[in-house]
Image: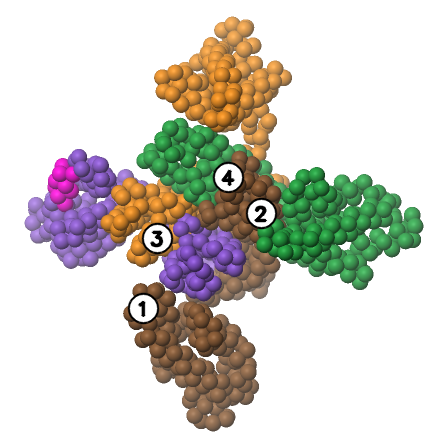
Chain colours: A green, B brown, C purple, D orange
Amino acid sequence: MSKDQSPRADRSPHALAPWRGKLHELIFEADTPAGKAFDVLLIATILLSIVVVIIDSIPSVEREWGTYLYVCEWVFTFLYTIEYALRLICLGRPLRYALSFYGIVDLVAVLPTYLSIFIAGSQSLIVVRALRLVRIFRVFKLAHYLTEADALGRALRATGKRIVVFLVFVLAIILILGASMYVVEGRTPDTDFTSIPRGIYWAIVTVTTVGYGDVTPQTGLGRTLAAVAMLLGYSIISVPIGVFSVELLAARQRITTQACPECSKEGHDADAEYCKFCGAKL
Amino acid sequence: MSKDQSPRADRSPHALAPWRGKLHELIFEADTPAGKAFDVLLIATILLSIVVVIIDSIPSVEREWGTYLYVCEWVFTFLYTIEYALRLICLGRPLRYALSFYGIVDLVAVLPTYLSIFIAGSQSLIVVRALRLVRIFRVFKLAHYLTEADALGRALRATGKRIVVFLVFVLAIILILGASMYVVEGRTPDTDFTSIPRGIYWAIVTVTTVGYGDVTPQTGLGRTLAAVAMLLGYSIISVPIGVFSVELLAARQRITTQACPECSKEGHDADAEYCKFCGAKL
Amino acid sequence: MSKDQSPRADRSPHALAPWRGKLHELIFEADTPAGKAFDVLLIATILLSIVVVIIDSIPSVEREWGTYLYVCEWVFTFLYTIEYALRLICLGRPLRYALSFYGIVDLVAVLPTYLSIFIAGSQSLIVVRALRLVRIFRVFKLAHYLTEADALGRALRATGKRIVVFLVFVLAIILILGASMYVVEGRTPDTDFTSIPRGIYWAIVTVTTVGYGDVTPQTGLGRTLAAVAMLLGYSIISVPIGVFSVELLAARQRITTQACPECSKEGHDADAEYCKFCGAKL
Amino acid sequence: MSKDQSPRADRSPHALAPWRGKLHELIFEADTPAGKAFDVLLIATILLSIVVVIIDSIPSVEREWGTYLYVCEWVFTFLYTIEYALRLICLGRPLRYALSFYGIVDLVAVLPTYLSIFIAGSQSLIVVRALRLVRIFRVFKLAHYLTEADALGRALRATGKRIVVFLVFVLAIILILGASMYVVEGRTPDTDFTSIPRGIYWAIVTVTTVGYGDVTPQTGLGRTLAAVAMLLGYSIISVPIGVFSVELLAARQRITTQACPECSKEGHDADAEYCKFCGAKL
């Protein structure tokens, strides 16, 4: 979020042409009144366009208001296309923006409508515009609440790889549970387990404790296996929660401390009297 | 809970008339025997009136005892209306009470019965009277258990905004999952995903691991998407739990901390009398 | 678990008669070879009697082996009745044992079979004998793993009241959600919400994220309310987990410390140098 | 993972014959280019053979490609059989490997195909080959992410026994809930609770909050009991999560702790070079 696209430092848009500088200020900045008004308007139209797509998908609404909503969708899409073009124009390094997180989201938010000409129904994917709402954080200074979310971010990154290892482990269990269930129940009449992929689907539904009940065991042995899967899913949820909580605690404590006056290294405990890196008095 | 409505400090009811002071003591105070008896009686009638509404909604009970229960409801409502009027009368600043949490709850607890004259069935909302039971904490001195719940409250407030950011993030995911499912399964015969709102409903049911099973995917691609949604919901529950636990720990430790007057070190327990680092009296 | 029934200190059974002392040692003690053998045998018969009840409830098994299993049940029950009588006889203060946790469990474990003479089917409650298995901890010295479970116990007790307050709060929400759903969906044809109790049942199923799917909303408004209930249930689970974790951490840290040599009070931090109660050097 | 099977220290394979040393290097080592290539190839074939088994279980795929997939399965199995034999040959102490975790997994990964000659359908168990993927950690040096997972491992081991005690307790509750439900609902027409084992299955489905909905109560009393089971399952999940989190925190802190040689104080971070209390070199 902090890696915003203001490439002023390298090749400033102001140096290129005055109108491009003005445009840059309007579109990219959120500090000037005009820039803030632009962002608020943008967020409002995003919300509106999402609502249009959602209610357009309801058959009874579509029958009555379909044409109007169809026009709305295209108007929004044209506006966003123009906005995207302007963003590219007013920047000194357009490619840099185009490849940034915001740039990709802005492009992807426009594509589904055009795609719908070729693939019917794809305009529903317009809801990816929801991702553009991340701008809300910038406009309403919500980033403030993310300063500690920095600790959150660091904890997530520190936990990430370990959670992946955990997920690989869980997926291996799910694979084995799903296949075992197929072996156990695959031959009973009226079985729900007609293939291993369905067994795997069942295992995921069960271990994550979602439990739709659309695929369920019928035999005693199958039910016993299901009971094992459930107790497993109920127990292992402790692992990611514990890992993340402890990591978050560590990330938070690391923040709360000062830098050493001599070696300027951080990461001391709150009750430390001497720098743990160079031995200087803190 | 602590911001109770005893406006004695500003315009005391005792100064207005003796009977109003007595009434105030009876209705608002819980320390005198009469006041406590009043509150206990009040809580008993609240519980009773809730039970009346609940059992009145059962068709077989309604058929047999409907008239009696109907009378009961109106008796309770009249009593509460009188009580509400008395509360307003015996206070020097009735508006202040009327706009407080307790005042609004007391009013709302009375309205559904009157509303039921115009809108059939609305008397079931009488169960909002359950909120009046918050008085229990005052009467039975349960507030004692909330002193540390103060730490709980502070942790909740500190976490609140971050949980909201988390919920916004989760809702964006839910929106995208729901719309994607509509794109994937919306055209299969006998589909459960007849519109994006139903897709969103499915996504919420799945990500929160509730899993009713009333809306489920039928195709392989849909099942794969559902599996992703489930694993996501199973994983991200770590975030609010971790954030809240760490915040609660911090709020708890902050309470128990004061600095030593001699060595000015912190980190002492709430029940410590001497500094644990230099032995000086705290 | 530690409050076992050996009232040797007050009116010792050894003082009464030698055979009663021997019997006491056999039945109540787990340290002597004979006492341990008795306990192991007891646990084995408990497990066996539970298995008998469970498989006897399966219609096909009951048809074939019903008579044998019926006899087994009565044999076990007679043995336990004799054992209970012996326990009462060999103690100096039988009433004290009869009213202890173990005494009540031992009695309750015997009753269902006798009850089944009057109330058909009640013998299934024999599974309460599972509670007698708590003895396992004593026999196999599992209490060792409970020394820190002492921290667990203290954390549970410290959390207990706050969890109750939390549950009361959750129940109030459930009540209001259930009644609201009845108001919203109670009049639609083929509704699942035929009364407020069913609405409350639905609310519990939803907030706890169990989600059977036997009672589900049919209208758009109902689904929206259900979505709120789900997100609520998904979020508030953080509260008991956080409260318990923090309390457990506190209970654990309190244990890990030594007593003050002067005032012999405990509860010092691991890094404390001076007693925080009397200021003496630790 | 660290207890790998390189028995070089005792009876080195190099001492036996040069080709066996080479073979050992190729098959068991992951540091040489050849050894790494072998492991990567192995992992690829494992993934491929799992995919083959999974898609072979889909009836429509089996009808069309059944013969080819059947041949593939046997080819993979023969290759693994040869590989297993080579592993045994090139080691000085083959039995040691055969009884290690890796050895048993390697054998078990081969058996299902042979078993399928005698027991139809058992080849689906080939997915246990997924366990062979643990090698991934070795090849891609993921063990690095497990150094702290060492803390995870220690926490899991420290928690293990307490979690078992917790599970025994939960199972006792499940047993009693299941039997009670059978007593309550077993005689109603069209009941789902036809035996105690089905009641136990229901109790597990409910307490773990999975909630399939294939076995649900029909009567008011049954629903009340179900509500208790749900609230119980929702509450007690705090226990394993809290126990594991606290244990993980302790395991993590224990790692990062060494005493200062001068003031012998503990509590230093893992990356500390100087004592944070007296500034002495650690």
Marks 1 and 3 sit apart, C-alpha to C-alpha, by 27 Å
Quarter of the figure with residue B263: bottom right
Q: Splitting the image into 4 quarters, where does residue D227 fall?
A: bottom left
Amino acid tagged 3: Ala
Evaluate whether label 1 is on the same chain as label 3: no
Q: Nearer the viewer, mark 1 or mark 3?
A: 1
Give, as a three-letter code, the residue at label 2. Answer: Gly
Q: CA distance from mark 4 to mark 2?
A: 15 Å
Which residue has dot 3 on it? Answer: D226
Residue placed under numbered mark 2 in the picture: B178
- Magenta segment, which residues? C66-77
* Circle 4 SS class: loop
Q: Which residue is mark 4?
A: B218
Residue A133, which numbered label? none
Q: Chain of mark 3?
A: D
Q: Which mark is residue B63?
A: 1
Residue under disc 4 on the same chain as residue under disc 2:
yes
Are callouts 2 and 1 both on one chain? yes
Please tell me which residue is depicted at 70% across the width and 55% down the height of the picture: A68
The amino acid type of the residue labelled 1 equals: Arg
